[in-house]
Image: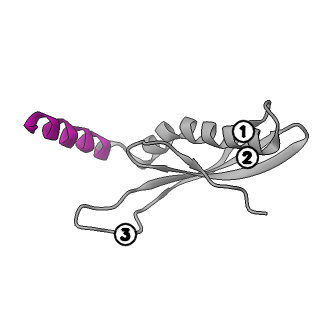
Amino acid sequence: MKRTLLVAVAVLGLAGCQSDQQMLDSSQSMALESAVNRARFDMNCPTATGSVLSRQVIEPVVQTRFGGTTRYEYTIGIEGCDKRTSAVVICPQGGGGCFAAQERK
């Protein structure tokens, strides 16, 4: 139990040492993959490709005594099969996957 707690604290401590730029870099490929996979389905275009248009760090909305979750937001442009769209992808700090928001129409 103590060892697990010690490992968790060490991992969190190391994550705190990375810059925002490094964290954005580390989540970017997962964000791009999430957006492109969703767009391929939505556009019915298995050859669609994507590129990062913008990215930013979003500070926690709710602060508790334990802190909040920092998120990384990516705007991804996707094109293929004579179609173009974009998606906003949110990745929480610490992993756990990214969420590609549905396009607004």
Quick check: marks 2 and 1 in contact, CB under 8 Å? yes
Q: CA distance from mark 2 to mark 3?
A: 29 Å
Which residue corresponds to mark 1?
50
Q: CA distance from mark 2 to mark 1?
A: 5 Å
Residue 82 percent location from the top left of the image: 91, 40
Q: How many marks?
A: 3
Mark whose residue sits in front, 2 or 3: 3
The quarter of the picture where the C terminus appears is bottom right
Residue type at mark 2 is Gly
Q: How many neighbours does mark 2 have within 10 angstroms: few (below 14), some (14-19), or many (20 or more)?
A: many
Which residue corresponds to mark 3?
62
**SS assignment at label 1:** strand
Q: CA distance from mark 3 to mark 1?
A: 32 Å
Residue type at mark 3 is Val
Which is nearer the N-term, disc 3 or disc 1?
1
Left or right placement of residue 45 versus residue 69 in this view: right
Left or right placement of residue 59 versus residue 14 in this view: right
Q: How many neighbours does mark 3 have within 10 angstroms: few (below 14), some (14-19), or many (20 or more)?
A: few
